[in-house]
């Protein structure tokens, strides 16, 4: 188990905080804060897979149907005791939760491309009976609706009628001549739930009734006229009956919740987990993160890695990009790897990026083990480890009377005790805080001990003696952060295989240290150390010239390839012009055959005669012959699946037009292609290079005829009474026409009957390239006797 101190040091908690920013509830934020690196490879891969499925849905324009919701744990705890009754305003919290569960259940119902999400959330139902009862009984403000029960509706209607009678009678009383002279005012109001009129205090005996209140000035008595007391009492009885009925309704709802409490709690936990995964997916999309490989081998490979917090800051501030990190360590257990070093020591100037490289490697490793995609190339790889041990930063402790060096030594002692073959160790500023020679000796011994224990180690240092030790020791490698000596600025790029320099004197001079002081310091350096640093500088200059020569050779190679390509294109143009005349004639012949086919198909659809079928067969044969002849002059090209990328334009044989690739599934060898308003999934073998044939606004229908100018393709089809074969024969052109018209939703009426036609239709729709999803009709749509289809 990786310790909390390590997570805090590498700022893993800030990653979780960024993920929780996408949460829809406080419960999700709490659950996100509990995410920790896992030690079960299957669990890590499962979480990666679940996040990837959400991201693939988003690429298709489908977001999970999540909305803001609250934690229902307090509500369930309050309603569990027998006889417990909650206030209707407390029950309102269930509305968004049940509606969200229902929406997700519908969203997942017929999808076959998200097996891991369905495994997690396939049991979501949304408790439709409970939701229906709540929606018919309580509004969004927690008020009981008239529709909650027939009795409540009747009581409220009587109450409204009686109230209106009382108001009308009071209005008549205040206008009567014998009463007007005794009134303080002519308005009607209520006091203590009783209807009253304002009477002057000195005249209250002149109006028959009951005094219910007196004004603050003492000049007005609020009296209930005697003749409405009976009506008011009747109204109070209705109010009491209404309240009793409302209590009964709420009690019934609470009993339903109590019966479903365990299921509600379980489905709520699933909803929270989905929200957590959705937050991880959105966070990964914001960084352009990828899923790395998790292996059992002792091997770390970071390719184009970026520190996620720096990447977030750069995105928010619109600053320049973060310099990517490339690092490889370990690999003795991987025969295909050229990296066999177990210990890496990074040197270089202050503020050159050594510590950031260390923290980037550690934080990406933690994210990968937690199932969170990392901002690095998908070729990155991290080992499954039992612990990540770090010593980073100034650990000086005043409370424990420890100096910086003492604190580092204490921490490293604990690391040595816990390190083994399943640990990764990150050590920052190794050997600092004490006399350099002794500090270097201790550091070299520590590195040797960690190597013997089998741990993978990445360390940073400024001590030259450590660099020499690493250079001579098998299984250890030096690395450095690149530095521009001309501008005296760090480049933040890691170079493996050569040590770096601190450039302290150059930097000191640049930042204002007097030349005389720098000169004295330079003279105090030993000759060997000076020669050592000069040798390093010479090696780096040679390396730079080598890279420039390689770059020039690469440029010349590209120029030669470009000239060869131009020559090939000119030769191809000449060949193309030679074929154009013959191909044009054959295309005209093909159009003639197509025109004939349209006419014959029109006859077939109208009369369906046997001779027409024979005619269509002959025309099919003629068209196939012309196509075959065309292929001799224009051989069909194929595309390798590895060469296809999202956004490429390809020719789709099934529809005869170009389309844009929106998704590539290399595992199954299938592509998702958008052509005009239509999106379909095809095998990679069914596409070829683009031909410049854009999809027409309307493609010919299956019968070979264009719709009449004023005709409109219907949005529903009635198959009742047809045999299965005849029904499916009509269904295919119906789907094609509707897709080309850009319709989003269709209705297929097949009736219930024996269920054979219904099953055949739904089996036909399942996996159809034009169908995104389908569902049984709602009661007003025909129920089980109809199927509602959503097109891609």
Image: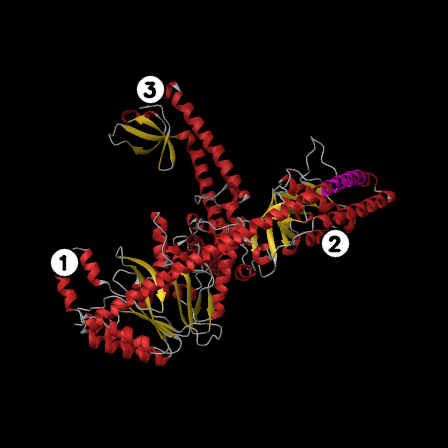
**Which is more toward the observer, 264 or 625?**
625
Q: Which label belongs to residue 774? A: none
Q: Residue at x 49, y 66 (%)?
A: 45
Place of residue 187 in the rendered image (x, y in percent of width and height, measured from the top left): 36, 25
Gap in Å between the C-alphas at discs 1 and 3? 108 Å
| Residue 613 rendering spot, x and y as whole percentages | 84, 45
* Tag 1 secondary structure: helix
Q: What residue did someone put label 2 on?
A: 756
| Residue 128 visible in the snapshot | no
Question: Of the residues under marks 1 and 3, which one precedes in the sequence?
Answer: 3
Depth order, front residue of 684/313: 684
Quadrant of res 553: bottom left
Q: Classify 222 as above or below 53.
A: above
Check residue 520 for magenta coloring.
Answer: no
Q: Which residues are magenta?
A: 582-600
Q: Would you say 790 lies left or right of 580 here?
A: left
Element type where label 2 sits in the image:
helix
> Which of the marked residues, 1 or 2, is nearer the chain's N terminus?
1
Q: Residue furthest right?
A: 611
| Label whose residue precedes the other's in the sequence (3 or 2) | 3
Q: Which residue is mark 3?
A: 181
**How far apart are the two marked residues, 1 and 2, measured between alpha carbons?**
95 Å
Mark 3 residue element = loop
Q: Is residue 144 above or below residue 207?
A: below
Return the residue at label 1: 515
Q: Position of residue 23 (x, y in %)?
A: 41, 53
Whether tag 1 and tag 2 are in contact, CB under 8 A, the answer is no
Closer to the camera, 175 or 747? 747
Residue 767 seen in render: yes
Magenta-colored stretch includes residue 583: yes
Q: CA distance from mark 3 to mark 2?
A: 84 Å
Instruction: State which mark lies toward you, 1 or 2.
Output: 1
């Amino acid at each position: 188990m990786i310790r909390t101190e390590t997570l805090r040091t590498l700022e893993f908690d800030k990653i979780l905080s960024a993920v929780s920013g996408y949460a829809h509830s406080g419960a999700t934020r709490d659950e996100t804060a509990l995410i920790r690196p896992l030690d079960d490879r299957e669990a890590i891969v499962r979480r990666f897979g679940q996040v990837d499925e959400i991201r693939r849905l988003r690429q298709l324009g489908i977001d999970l149907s999540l909305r803001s919701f609250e934690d229902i744990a307090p509500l369930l705890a309050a309603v569990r005791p027998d006889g417990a009754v909650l206030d209707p305003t407390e029950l309102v919290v269930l509305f968004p939760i049940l509606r969200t569960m229902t929406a997700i259940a519908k969203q997942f119902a017929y999808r076959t491309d998200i097996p891991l999400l369905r495994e997690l959330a396939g049991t979501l139902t949304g408790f439709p009976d409970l939701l229906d009862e709540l929606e018919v009984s309580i509004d969004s403000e927690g008020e009981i609706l008239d529709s909650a029960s027939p009795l409540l509706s009747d009581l409220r209607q009587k109450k409204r009628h009686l109230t209106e009678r009382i108001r009308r009678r009071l209005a008549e009383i205040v206008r009567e001549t014998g009463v007007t002279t005794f009134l303080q005012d002519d308005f009607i109001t209520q006091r203590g739930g009783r209807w009253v009129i304002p009477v002057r205090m000195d005249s209250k005996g002149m109006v028959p009734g009951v005094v219910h209140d007196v004004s603050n000035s003492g000049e007005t008595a609020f009296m209930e006229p005697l003749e409405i007391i009976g009506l008011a009492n009747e109204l109070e009885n209705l109010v009491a009956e209404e309240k009793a009925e409302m209590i009964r309704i709420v009690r019934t709802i609470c009993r339903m919740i109590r019966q479903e409490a365990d299921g509600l709690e379980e489905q709520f936990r699933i909803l929270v987990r989905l929200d957590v995964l959705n937050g991880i997916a959105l966070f990964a999309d914001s960084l352009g993160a990828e899923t790395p490989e998790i292996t059992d081998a002792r091997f770390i490979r970071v390719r184009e890695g970026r520190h996620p917090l720096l990447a977030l800051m750069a995105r928010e501030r619109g600053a320049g990009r973060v310099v990517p990190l490339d690092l490889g360590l370990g690999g003795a257990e991987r025969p295909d790897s050229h990296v066999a070093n177990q210990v890496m020591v990074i040197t270089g100037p202050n503020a050159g990026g050594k510590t950031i490289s260390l923290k980037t490697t550690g934080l990406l490793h933690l994210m990968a083990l937690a199932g969170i995609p990392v901002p690095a190339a998908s070729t990155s790889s991290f080992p499954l480890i039992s612990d990540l041990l770090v010593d980073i930063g100034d650990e000086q402790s005043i409370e424990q009377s420890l100096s910086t060096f003492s604190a580092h030594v204490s921490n490293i002692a604990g690391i040595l005790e816990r390190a083994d073959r399943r640990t990764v160790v990150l050590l920052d500023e190794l050997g600092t805080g004490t006399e350099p020679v002794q500090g270097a000796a201790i550091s070299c011994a520590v590195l040797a001990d960690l190597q013997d224990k089998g741990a993978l180690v990445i360390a940073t240092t400024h001590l030259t003696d450590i660099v020499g030790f690493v250079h001579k020791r098998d299984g250890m490698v030096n690395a450095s952060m690149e530095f521009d000596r001309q501008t005296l600025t760090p480049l933040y790029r890691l170079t493996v295989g050569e040590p770096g320099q601190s450039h302290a004197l150059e930097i000191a001079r640049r930042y204002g240290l007097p030349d005389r002081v720098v000169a004295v310091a330079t003279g105090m350096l030993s000759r060997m150390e000076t020669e050592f640093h000069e040798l390093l500088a010479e090696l780096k200059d040679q390396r730079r010239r080598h890279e420039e020569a390689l770059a020039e050779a690469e440029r010349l190679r590209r120029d030669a390839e470009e000239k060869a390509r131009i020559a090939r294109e000119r030769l191809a143009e000449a060949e193309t012009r030679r074929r154009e005349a013959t191909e044009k004639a054959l295309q005209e012949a093909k159009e003639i055959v197509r025109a004939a086919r349209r006419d014959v198909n029109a006859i077939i659809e109208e009369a369906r005669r046997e001779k027409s079928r024979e005619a269509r067969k002959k025309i099919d044969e003629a068209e196939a012959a012309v196509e075959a002849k065309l292929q001799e002059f224009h051989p069909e090209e194929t595309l390798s699946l590895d060469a296809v990328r999202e956004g490429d334009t390809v020719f789709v044989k099934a529809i005869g037009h170009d389309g844009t690739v929106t998704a590539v599934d290399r595992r199954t060898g299938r592509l998702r292609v958008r052509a005009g308003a239509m999106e379909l999934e095809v095998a990679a073998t069914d596409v070829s290079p683009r031909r410049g044939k854009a999809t027409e606004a309307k493609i010919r229908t299956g019968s070979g005829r264009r719709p009449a100018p004023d005709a409109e393709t219907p949005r529903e089809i009635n198959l009742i009474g047809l045999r299965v074969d005849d029904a499916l024969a009509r269904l295919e052109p119906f789907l094609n026409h509707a897709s080309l018209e850009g319709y989003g939703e269709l209705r297929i009426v097949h009736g219930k009957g024996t269920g054979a036609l219904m099953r055949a239709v739904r089996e036909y729709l399942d996996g159809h390239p034009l169908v995104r999803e389908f569902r049984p009709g709602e009661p007003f749509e025909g129920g089980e006797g109809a199927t509602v289809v959503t097109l891609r």
